[in-house]
Image (cartoon, rainbow, N blue to C red):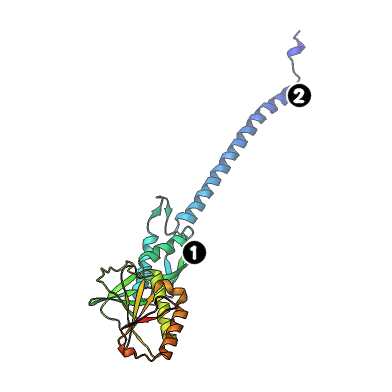
Amino acid sequence: MMNRKFLKTKGQLDILAERKPKGRMGKSAHKKKRLVFLFFFFLILAGLIYFFVYSSFFRINRVIINGINEVENINAVQIGVNKYTEGYKFFIWPKNNILFLNKGKAVLFLGQDIKIEDIKIAKELPRTLIVEAKDKLPILFWQEVEQGYYIDKSGLVLAAVNDNTKYNLPVIARSTTTAVSVGVKIIGENDVSFIRMAIGKIGEKLRGFKIAKIEVKDYSNRDVSFYIDGGWRLIMSVAGKKEIDGALDNLVGFLEQEVVDTKQIEYIDIRIPDKIFYK
């Protein structure tokens, strides 16, 4: 007679048979589902990365340039954009992808060597870049012996030119010989600002007197002489920028009250705002 302790009924055996394989099959199926999910997840992720980063869909292929009139500057901007978007960043990210283009850095890059200012860059998805800027126009004509140079509002030498006929700018020079190079500042921005302001104020207050030439004394540019048609010069100081109105008003009063023949005057000095010296 067999020991009942080791015997199982048919129903019990069927239950045990169903339980064991089912647990193993469940784990295996779950693992397969997970692998399939991960496979498709990474496949979709790789597809998205390729589409947004490496495909031609977001590759800049059109540059619209607005506000610039000089053909030379338009061509320079186009070349500059091509150069800035050339190659890869960190050997991975394509620089011509419009999504990852840094507008601020692109503005700085274009403003380094191109004669433009007030640069703005906008993106027009999916592939168009819009560059808006203004031509950097000369403010002064720097005369150095027989060679002329255009100077912008920051004091930068824009170009070497033969004459002043194109813009008919105020002529400026230094009392000493100066080495001038294109792309280099020859005079400070504050000095240029003062000279521009003084030109406007002189024209406004000293009507009938025309400025023929401007001369800065030395490299410090502290003293500026405005040569007036008629042979005399008006000496002013950059340091007196805030008092320029008062100094010129005093000069107007002096010229009206005193019997002064400007043809006999060599210079009038108003570097000290409340005093007038002349010879």
Q: Is residue 139 left or right of residue 16?
A: left
**Residue 77 drawn above or below residue 226:** above
Separation of residues labelled 1 and 2 (CA atoms): 68 Å
- Residue at image point 34% right, 89% down: 262
Which of the numbered marks, if any, corresponds to residue 87? none
The residue closer to the viewer here, 30 or 162, is 162
Image position of 262 with respect to 159: above or below: below
Say which element carries label 2: helix
Quadrant in the picture for the N terminus: top right
How far across and down, in percent of the image, does residue 220 sit?
Answer: 34, 67
Judged left or right of residue 111, residue 173 is left
Q: Residue at x 59, y 36 (%)?
A: 31
Q: Nearer the viewer, mark 1 or mark 2?
A: 1
Q: Position of residue 265 (x, y in %)?
A: 32, 86
Q: Is residue 100 visible?
A: yes
- Image quarter for residue 266? bottom left
Mark 2 neighbour density, 10 Å: few (under 14) some (14–19) many (20 or more): few
Q: Indicate the quadrant where residue 202 lies.
A: bottom left
Q: Which amino acid does label 1 sit on?
A: Pro
- Identify the image quadrant of the C terminus: bottom left
Asked which quadrant contains residue 95, the reply is bottom left
Q: Position of residue 131 (x, y in %)?
A: 44, 69
Q: Is residue 262 depicted above or below 50 in this figure?
A: below
Front-most of residues 115 and 56: 115
User: Residue most toward the left?
Assistant: 146
Amino acid type at circle 2 is: Gly
**Residue topped by disc 1:** 126
In percent of the image, x 56 and y 42: which residue is there? 38
In the displayed structure, 51 sits above or below 211; it is above
Q: Which residue, as the protein is rendered here, is positioned at the far top?
A: 1
Instruction: Find disc 2 in the rendering and name its residue.
Output: 11
Q: In this orientation, does residue 57 appear?
A: no
